[in-house]
Structure formats: structure tokens, C-alpha cells
Image (cartoon, rainbow, N blue to C red):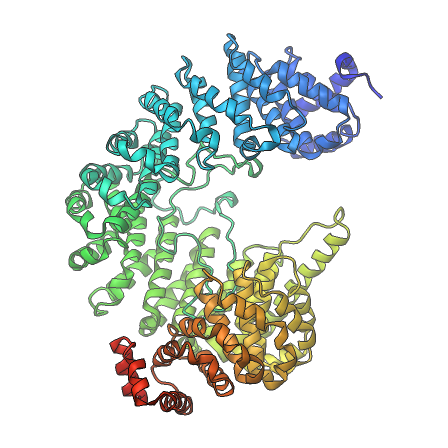
Amino acid sequence: MFNMAETWSPQEDGLCQILQLLKESQSPDNATQRAVQQKLEELNKYPDFNNYLIFVLTKLTSEDEPTRSLSGLILKNNVRAHFHKFPAPVADFIRSECLSAIGDPSPLIRATVGILITTISSRGELANWPELLPKLCQMLDSQDYNVCEGSFGALQKICEDSSEILDSDALNRPLNILIPKFLQFFQHSSSKIRSHALACVNQFIMSRTQALMIHIDAFLQGLMHLAADDDAEVRKNVCRALVMLLDVRMDRLVPHMHNIIEYMLGRTQDGNETVALEACEFWLSLADQPICKEVLSPHLAKLVPVLVKGMRYSEIDIILLKGDVEEDEMIPDREQDIRPRFHKSRTHTLHRDGAESGRPANADGEIPEDEEDLEEGDEDDGMDSDSALSDWNLRKCSAAALDVLANVFKDDLLPVLLPILKETLFHADWEIKESGILALGAIAEGCMTGMVAHLPELVPFLINCLSEKKALVRAITCWTLSRYAHWVVGQPHDQYLKPLMTELLKRILDGNKRVQEAACSAFATLEEEACTELVPYLGFILETLVYAFSKYQHKNLLILYDAIGTLADSVGHHLNKPDYINLLMPPLITKWNVLKDEDKDLFPLLECLSSVATALQSGFLPYCEPVFRRCISLVEQTLNQHIASMQQPDQFEAPDKDFMIVALDLLSGLTEGLGGHIERLIVASNIMQLLYQSMQDPMPEVRQSSFALLGDLTKACFQHVLSCLPEFLPILGQNLNPEFISVCNNATWAIGEIAVKLGNEMHNYIPLFLNQLIAIINRPNTPKTLLENTAITLGRLGFVCPHDVAPHLQQFAQRWCMSLRNIRDNEEKDSAFRGMCNMIAVNPGGIVHDFIFFCDAVASWVSPRPDLKEQFVKILQGFKSQVGEEGWKRFTDQFPPPLRERMSQQYGV
């Protein structure tokens, strides 16, 4: 046991030992680092080890500041991990030392003490440290600058980390005192203090904290006072406040809107880029406000040139992006430059137009990536790596702002923008020309109608720019062209599509890695737009993509997989030709054989193979066995590792479930592509047992992919699913929770597929699902895909067991008809409508109230099969004879004219 907190003092040898450890922990050597970690864990067993750490931080002025600060950060980690286990005297000692050292002369030590204080507070300890806030608040009034600044630094961190509890009754609402106090410091002579005060108040804007709302006018006056502050950090916080107030207190900003816009225009051009970036966010937020068009119209002529100018690469950007290095394809990628890619689990949608491809960033046409992650931030503290080019910068924000404003103003933006584009696109300076090409891409969505007239001239100009000398110009041109791909595909092929494709394929083989990446992403977008229009050029496309395999470094290989997967999704079975298969499969299988089971590069490769297998159908047969076996093994390994880590968490790490998810999705792709051919593989495997486990996994994405596979297996080889249904169907019933949209969606779809195969034996299982499905279809704001799948499944249950479902018809008929009127004719829609007809036959009264909706849904069919059409006619004629000519006329008079016309043309009623 050790002395009470007041009398504690360190032992000399203990102190030496800890200082030695702190010195060693600054060594770059990995072995030393590991030894230090081990030593720290041992020392944590001594109750007063943490007393030594706080002592070094706050008292040991003989040591250098970095060592003292490090001691505080180790203590912070201990507090975070097990403060609740600290003996009371230790906890008290640490708290009192923190408060006495808050005004340390060294900014680094003050900041470390502040971090320590907020870490203790955010461990739910604010309530156990009642003197903290009053003490900090009182120290704000100290004449000693260091004490005032240290207290403010700590308060700012507490406001950031514990804003919710500060605004609760738990602590007796301290904000009622703190916020007016913070507002007083807006006038302080030190810019650092002004900045802290404003940052503290800013934490409470988005939550509309009452204590701030009652002082909103004083706050706005304070902001006006700080608007022209000479300190960049203060100006940044003013801009941040105004951006948030747009969302929260627009009513208070409207009277000053003209001046605020003028102010923000100036700040968007601030000499300090972090201020300019913060100000530029204002335009993004304003675009979301209904008032945007009205208040911004008078300023457009000033704003647009500012945004286009903000889109230029700065000199620093160009240095960091190695913009002067034209050829770098031989230089291997650094591992830290490769962003983690997240697999997008398979979701069953009704119009499967490449719905499953998990596209990488920027393939969907958002502002393109152009910054390397030069600093991996400390995940734990969510650090913004300000020292390098962080992801979000003025260039991207300006481009995003132009994009959203184009969506607000549509073609009204063009009179202002076109003259600027004329000047920038043809400028001799490549940086300016590049920003013009980016601007042209940014407005594509919003101003498309007005741009159409200019595209016959602009698209050939852009295709020409793909051969520019500067790599950064070639890269942005790829992106901008992809934004106009939809228009290109709609024109005669020889005019634009062929030249665009030829040049993009050359860029896929560019000598510059950034251009390769941009071209691959742009080509994936073109594939999605063109779909089967690409079939005539498949040989040419595949030769290029396969050649890229031998050229690409690590990062771009991952994007190449995506381009190949998207191609397969887009052209489907047209890929199933021996020549194409012989070109494409060998390099994919070579990669497949090289990668180890624990290599994350398997994700994009498995996704790609999933699309290829689905497209090749029987053409994939020669490759399917090893692929199938490995997927089964990946699922099995992951499940076993999961069980081991649950049973013995200290010995086994939890697995990365993505391996299992991607493997399940590839098994779905194989099953969908190979159909009945998959059966011999199923028989020889334990897939059903694994599926039983994975369907009950705690992770929603695993369940989502499991249900997709179950649905595909049901379609391909039902006899192997059949014996498992008593175990499987209750699990499906438990997953009809619309809070997990994709899980619910796939479970619903699988139930429908099983119903069609099982027929009237589904009768015993219907109580497991019916009420939940009816609740989902009637739920407000249910996403479209889930509504459609729910309607299909209700229809299919009605098809096989009309007597069980028809009595409930009135509860869902209207929503059912509305959900299915917009989907194309297909097998699923066919079986669902047959189900509706069966239910109406059993319970005609159930549709009477919603008959107009039924007519509308029937009219959505382009060409129903003859026997289904016959059922429609029978129901329509039956209803007509029931109400008589007069009643029918009154009824059809409510129809919109197109519906009336269609009904009489198609069904003679």
C-alpha cells in the first residue's frame, strides 16, 4: 500500500526506471518498442505507477518537454483503458495535479494536461469531479495568461468530447453559466483566447442547445465583431459558425444575408487556405436551403469566378502530387497509399443492372480523388493530417460547390460560367486549363440540358486533351468525359463513342499511374452507360484490359478488377465466347493462385470473379471447382476463427468478416451463373451447414450475403435446400427487421424464391412471415427496393397459399399495387401478379376498395403472358359486370386518360 495522495512522493529508483522507459519509447527500433510495451504492461500492476506518470508531466521540470508530455500521453492511455480501477487516492492525486498544472508555462505541457482532463471527463467522470468546471471557469478570469489559456484549452476539449452531458440535467446545466462566460471572451486581447472561446460556443450550435439559443443575438453580434479578425484560426471559426447557423438559425441570418454572402465571398479567397476551405463549405450548405436561389442570384457573377479559381491546383499540391513526374508506372506503390476498399455486400434488386458491383470511390462521378494520403492519421484520435494534403481541400470543395450550385441554378448558371470556361479551357497555362476541365465536369449533372448544344464541339476537344503533355490534365479529362458518357452513348457510335473508347483505352495503358487510375474509373462509368452497345468492341477492350494486368502496380490493379467486373455486368452473356474467355481468365486465375487467403486484395478480385462467373454462365465451368472450394474454405476459416475468438478472446483475435462476406457473394455469383451445373459441387461440400451458421452471424452484412446465397441456391438446386427448410425458415422470419434494410431485403427475397419452389407446403410457415411483411409494406419511408421485394414475396406467398394470405388482402392491396406498377415485366413480377389474381379469386371483397390501384398496376404490364392476361381480363370483366355499365362508367371516369385508354385497348373494358 502507498501513502495518501497529499503526502505521496516518488522513490528515486522508481523515477529513474520510468525516465529510462520514456527515453527508450522514443527509439525508432521496433524491438525496443515491443520491450517498452511489455514493461508498461508490467508497471501497470503497481497502483502508484500512474502517480509517477503525472509527477513527471507536472512537476519534473528538469526533464525536456517532449519526455514530460509523453509521460502524460501514456497516462492518458491508462486512464482511457482502466481509470475505473485506479485506487481512489491515485485518482484524487491525478485530478488535483491536473488542476494545479493547467497554467504550466509550456504550451505543450498545458495542452497535454488539457487532453488528460478531457479523457478523465469523457470516461463518465464529469459527475464524479464536481469541482472541475467551476474551477476551470474561475481560472478563465486569471490575470496569468498561461492559466487562462490552459483552462480554455481544457474547456474546449471538454466541450468537443462531452457536449451532450454538458447540456443535461445530470450536471445541473453548467452551460447556463459557461456560454455567457465564453461570449465575454470574444473581445479578449489574445487571439488564442478569442479562438478558444468561439470554438467552445461552436460545439453547441448543431444541437440547438437552449443555453446558446437564448443568447443567439449576442452570439451573432460577437461573430460580426470577430469577422475581420487578424488571426486565421478565429476567422476559420467564424466561417464554421456561419455554416452551421445556416442549418440551425436561418431565421436570424436572413436579415443580414446580403452582408454574410459578401463576407463569405471574401473569406473564400482568404490568403489562408484553411480559412478559405471553411468559407467554401458555406456555398455547399447554402445550396441545401430553399432560399438559396433567391439570395444567391445577385451574387452569382462574383461567386462563380471565385469557385473556378479555387479549383486550381496550388503549387504545394503539385509538389505533393509529383505533378512534374510524367512517367511513374515502373515505381511500385507504397502500401500506405492504398486506401482500404470496403466490399459492398450483395443486395437483391429487381432490375439487376449491375446493382451488385461495389464500385470504388469516384466511379460514381463525384469529384475525383487527386490527393495521396501522405500521412496515416492516428485512427484513435481521428487526427486530420494537416501536415500533408488531407483528402478534403479547397480545390475539391470549390468543385463540389459548383456541382451543387449547378443543380440549384441549372442552365441559369451558364451565362456566367461559359465565358469563364472559354477563357480557362483554352488557356496556355496547364494549371488553369486543368481547372477549366474540372469545372466542365462539375456542372455536367446540373447543366446538362443547356450543355447539350455545346457538346458536339466540347467532346472532341476533350478527347483531344486526353493526349495532353501534362499527366494531371490527362487524368482530369478522363473524369470529365465520364460525366458526359450518357450523352456520348446516345449519339451515333462513329461520331464520339468510338474515338472516346479508343483514346480512353490508350490512357488505361498510360505511363502515368494517376492517369491509368482515372482512365480505368472513367471506362467503368462508360461501361455502365453503354452496356451491350460495347459488344462489337469486346475483343479490343479485353486485349487492353488484359495487357494492363502486366503493366499495373498494386493500387491500380484493384481498380482494374473493378473495370473488368463492371464490363462483365454490362455485357452479360455476350462475354461467353471461347476467344474472350481465353483472353480474360488466365490472368485472373494466375492472380487468384498467387494471393494468400489472408490477403485483402482477394476482395476486389473475388468481386470481379463474381461478376465474370455470372456473365460467363457455363463458360465458367472449367474454372469453377477450385474457386468454389476456396470460397467454402474462406467461409469456414472465418466462422471457426469467430467461434474461437468468442470462446477464448485472449488467445484468438476476432476475424475480418469481409473475407467471408466476399466469399459468400462469389458463391452467389457462381450459383447464379452456373445454375444447375453447380449441383455436383454442392453435393460434395458442407455449404448448407456453413450457411446455417452464417445466417445467424451477429454482423448484418454477413447475414445479408448469406440470404442472397440462399435465394440463389433455391433457384439453382432446390433439392439441397429443401431438407434444411425447417431450420432455415424461422431464421429468415427473425430477419424481417426493416432497421437493417439490406438484410431484410435479401431475407424477403429468399422467402419468395423458396415459396415458388415449395408450393402449397409453404402453408405451415406462413405465420412466420405474413404479419411482418404486411407491416413492412405499410411502413412510411420504406426504400423502393425493399418495398418491391416485399410486394413480390407477398404475391408469391399468395400464389402458392392463396387461402392463407387472401383474408389479409385489404391490409396491403393498395401499397402492393403502387409498389409493383413501376417495375419491368419479368419472372418475379409474373409470379407475384399470378398470386394477386389467386388471392382476388379467394377474396374478391379484399380488392374492391383499391380496385383503381389494381387497374393501374395491371396497366403497367407491357406484354403479360397470354394465360396471365386472361386472368386479368376475367377479374376486370367480373368487376364490370358486378357494378353494371353505369357504375363502370362512373368508376372509369376517375381514371387518368392514359389509363382509361390502355384499359380499353389492352383488356377491352
Is residue 434 something that shows in the picture? Answer: no
Where does the N terminus fall, quadrant-wise? Answer: top right
From the viewer's side, name the closer residue of 73 and 541: 73
Q: Is residue 514 above or below residue 666?
A: above
Give the residue drawn at x 36%, y 80%.
855
Q: Is residue 786 above or below residue 907?
A: above
From the viewer's side, name the closer residue of 373 and 9: 9
Where does the C terminus fall, quadrant-wise? Answer: bottom left
Whether residue 595 sits left or right of residue 556 in the image: it is right
- Callout count: 0
Please state the horizontal and vertical placement of residue 883, each as a whole percent of the image. 36, 87
Residue 565: quadrant of the picture: bottom left
Is residue 842 something that shows in the picture? Answer: yes
Please state the horizontal and vertical placement of residue 870, each as a whole percent of the image. 40, 92
The extreme right residue here reads 1
Residue 490: quadrant of the picture: bottom left
From the viewer's side, name the closer residue of 118 and 582: 118
Please state the horizontal and vertical placement of residue 564, each as a whole percent of the image. 43, 64
Please state the horizontal and vertical placement of residue 754, each as a whole percent of the image. 58, 78
Give the residue drawn at x 74%, y 55%.
644
